[in-house]
Image (cartoon, coloured by chain):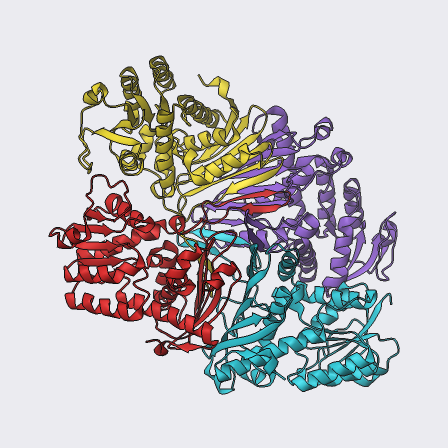
Chain colours: A red, B cyan, C yellow, D purple
């Protein structure tokens, strides 16, 4: 396979990013078709096809599923059965059984499957992963992740998203596994509703501190909040037996202004579209590379599954106010 | 009271710091006597007296108790009964009942009592406290404290110190109350022995992550380790509804060297003697100010008691692997 | 004019950047043709035409001249006479008379002309300019620019480039005018050959410190070196009556690694291709905007002329070891 | 000589600092006497003596001359003839001939003489010097010093101080020699009056950019201003063939506050009393060490002389608007 022929299903905010990255920036990709029942974007001549047409199309090697979460599992199964490789946006699905089921079909059909944990491909986090792999911090003992959004999504979104742990912190749970390269054994979360009472009324929380314990006793601490007034805050620090590596938040420029009242600098890059521009592009490159070179995808279905189990354990932990073992999640 | 006449009891590492600060740097103090059964330091002509002589001395207004922890409660009671104001190094005592008992006597005798939570007087942490008080972060929601030592103390010390929570993290527990200005309701700790198996054999832990929940649901996360190979690490961050304030670690200079391999800068100030030089001096100034001006001491016996309860709850939490309410500690 | 139809002349390193930016990233541009006598790059179906064909082409509104410097003035005149708007890479020409001549023709023909001072469009420098315009530093008194390359170009290049002042520092001379928004009155340069004796043998210098004096007595200091072993170094600071604004160098990530030997972070972005990616894109956007909206170009022929005069004065200053007035350069 | 017996002459702002450092912080010093015709400070029982009494006193080994500049040369000669070692505040004298004369007498009398270039002993600058000595930057090629005061002194002071170059920039001229460890060959200064017209009327300037050329062609650039609204600004950077080392300005704490308008941090330490506290103490320690151990003083009379020549050359340079060779200053 020299050039990967891809169809993009779903052209919302993320689908559009993937379209532009694939069409303009990755020479090894040919976007053959797009599909979306409602949204129309500029596709530079690339045709809109129906889902059925895409699945039957003999010159489409892979699909990128960027449609609403509740369609993911169905489309994954359709694509797998049609012999298409699959890139799927996170989350895979909100129902654990459904995730397992569709992964089973993916496996049976022998197609590649990659889940869109884009943050794995951010230059900052890649550097930390690389330092850990090179042994620069020795044995990683404590991982700390700060992950705060600039503002909450609409309450309607929260109602269907699975809530803070499944739609937001799941990135951090994946990051914890990715950096530590170990499995989580136990989860303890403490949470609150501080940002908006309506979020609490919708059955979710907006602020949480989660402690993960890994198999070997090492730990991760993740703090999340739906609203940081100073903007999107994405930091990470890993402390180990031989050193400590960390990355700070990202800013649009590095100016400082000193005046009579102090030293002042810029607000961070506003949200994931600006902050993770590079990671989205790198992510797609890695998917394409996996197809072209026949290597492993760098974020698998099992990665999605494990992150989901951590999220479900976190939910259970706040309900029961006790540490919850991953083995309890089935 | 214009000039406070103080006797220093115990001239070990910390006692010597207090002696020099009081003798050389605080004009409102006259050091009248020192006492130590074994150690002799240069006292610039100030006499060594016995404990009994100090307690009976009519021209001594206050004592600074810097002797071993197991003598604190006895000396506090002696001094209180002798009508001397008291500055006492932390920890007050390892036994909760004994702490309560001696505080009871202090109260009955009507003397002032200040506990040596020196970090409250560090310029960095003072600034954070001040920003919180000015409302610059709004309602404080999540506090994060990093507190790592450059290396573990001797195992013999650990055996008698009460362990990581009572001798090391207790500073952080106090800091959490100091910054948040609320009481802790519940504690959850996760811990491990990663630094030295001998610490585990002595019944203690050397690495811990502790989540505190305050009365109003806000949270603090504290991570401790007995050994950071890169040196003493003391950082703090408070996230609130209107902003986030943080202080970084302290360094001996702010140089950077850029060469063919990267940008390099200094290791942090090595340990508490170097890191908290200013805070020890400020602390004594505040004690003296409380005596001279008749105002409240800025770190009371109750502050010590509350920090101790958090430490005991943390110990219980790791034994039972569950969140422990402060109200369970009696 | 809704969509600007552009031909790109010259497809070397910079020409390729402009091609990709215009073709993929700026919806208001249609690249109609490219031209290069030797180089062939992937043009996604856009035809290669001869210079003559481009100049005669009725559907080409503008040209981007990215060919060797010694062709610039000729092509500028050809394009102007053909009624094409012009974007020209710097330097305009190494001969002052030739620059004046071609600008005269541009003016007579009434086409727009923009010179490729791409650094004006870097987010860091844009921020500084904006802070100055907002009055945040008050009256700007002292500007400091650090501009060091990671390594020298081949000596052959230097022989035809006009040397350090005309090929490298000219960006900084332009930046000085851009930030200060005043004209330079006098120049004093001190220089040396420290990097490579062959550069000296070729009649050039590789290290220089230049002081510019503006009409109102305010000053700029620029230090240049052909080789910084730690990589490309591009910093700027402006000090004024009401404050000081500065930007630091740019790095590929913001990680730091603390280990037993210190704190370590990344080398800077390697050279102008990586460092000024965004500025090249912004630059083209501004050119296109000037055409579409009929507004002024943000880097004019006069801007190029003035920077060139400063460079020539700097050369004269090192030869004669004295401050040289811009009015001496004719 | 085990304990150095010192008399302090002059108890103004700086004399008081030296008194307290010597009396309280340096065990190897015994302050035997102080002298000041007008000022009375708390001396903790140390007697006030007349100048004559001090010079005749058999138990005084050394004097610290902190009196007004116009008395320095006289007192140096008196002390040298009386066989006392000498620490003298900068500047030595405003008249070059007088400096040479008194140094001649110092040499004839065989006493040690140290000039108060305290900044040499600042931890930041010491680190840079050490990095240069260790070869970490290779051959130092360009030194950059930023030195700006928070506000100008009274115009009356400027009239008698010798002006910006002799009272303020002289520290930077000394620093340039100290870091580069080479002699300056030529000076070019450009200056202006931007802060206060009264300074210009008094015949001085308040803003200057000075280029120093060293014997081997390497360069230093120093920018000075009498007023930085954001506070005292003291930075330094040395660029060399193998790397670049720099130190940033010093701040009272390292907090940052992120809120809806940006990231904010503290103003710098206000002025030399706060900024150079440690350097004053280190300086005195080095003087005492030179006496006790019989080693060289780390800032000699010749160091003072050379810095003064640079300052005089800078003055001549602005008057004549040309580079001035140090050899012209006699």
From the viewer's perspective, tell me whether residue C12 is left or right of residue B18: left
Residue B119, by quadrant, is: bottom right
Vertical order, A155 against D104 (above or below): below
Vertical order, D313 against B174 (above or below): above
Position of the C terminus of chain A, as image quadrant, is: bottom left
Q: Can residue B315 be seen here?
A: yes
Vertical order, B101 against D186 (above or below): below
Task: In the displayed orientation, state which residue is furthest to the left.
Answer: A58
Position of the N terminus of chain A, as image quadrant, is: bottom left
Residue A160 appears at what percent x and percent y?
Answer: 37, 60
Vertical order, C172 against A123 (above or below): above
Residue B52 appears at what percent x and percent y?
Answer: 82, 85
Q: Residue at x 16, y 68 (%)?
A: A108
Most foreground residue, D323 or A279: A279
From the viewer's perspective, tell me whether residue B236 is left or right of residue B300: left
Tally of numbered discs: 0
Residue C244, by quadrant, is: top right
Most foreground residue, A289 or C313: A289
Most foreground residue, B103 or D187: B103
Q: Can residue C146 be seen here?
A: no
Residue D172 appears at what percent x and percent y?
Answer: 61, 42
Most foreground residue, B185 or D283: B185
Residue B132 appears at what percent x and percent y?
Answer: 63, 58
């Amino acid at each position: 396979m020299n050039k990967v022929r891809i169809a993009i299903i779903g052209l919302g905010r993320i689908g559009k990013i993937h379209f532009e990255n694939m069409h303009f920036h990755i020479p090894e990709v040919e976007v053959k078709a797009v599909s979306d029942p409602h949204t129309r974007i500029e596709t530079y001549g690339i045709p809109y096809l129906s889902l059925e047409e895409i699945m039957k199309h003999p010159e489409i090697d892979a699909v990128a599923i960027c449609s609403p979460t509740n369609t993911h599992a169905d489309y994954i199964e359709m694509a797998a059965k049609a012999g298409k490789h699959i890139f799927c946006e996170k989350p895979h699905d909100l129902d654990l059984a459904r995730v397992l089921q569709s992964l089973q079909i993916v496996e049976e059909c022998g197609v590649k499957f990659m889940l869109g944990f884009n943050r794995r491909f951010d230059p900052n986090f890649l550097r930390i992963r690389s330092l850990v792999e090179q042994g620069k911090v020795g044995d990683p003992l404590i991982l700390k992740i700060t992950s705060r959004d600039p503002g909450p999504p609409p309450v309607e979104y929260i109602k269907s998203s699975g809530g803070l742990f499944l739609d937001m912190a799941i990135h951090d749970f994946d990051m914890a596994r990715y950096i530590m390269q170990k499995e989580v054994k136990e989860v303890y979360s403490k949470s609150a509703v501080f940002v908006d009472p309506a979020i609490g009324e919708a059955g979710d929380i907006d602020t949480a501190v989660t402690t993960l314990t890994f198999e070997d006793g090492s730990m991760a601490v993740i703090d999340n909040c739906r609203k940081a007034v100073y903007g999107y805050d994405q930091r990470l620090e890993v402390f180990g037996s031989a050193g400590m590596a960390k990355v700070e938040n990202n800013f649009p420029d590095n100016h400082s202004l000193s005046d009579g009242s102090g030293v002042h600098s810029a607000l961070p890059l506003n949200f994931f579209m600006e902050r993770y521009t590079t990671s989205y592009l790198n992510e797609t490159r890695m998917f394409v590379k996996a197809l072209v070179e026949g290597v492993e995808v760098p974020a698998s279905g099992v990665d999605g599954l494990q992150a989901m189990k951590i999220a479900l354990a976190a939910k259970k932990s706040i309900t029961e106010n006790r540490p919850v073992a991953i083995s309890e999640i089935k």
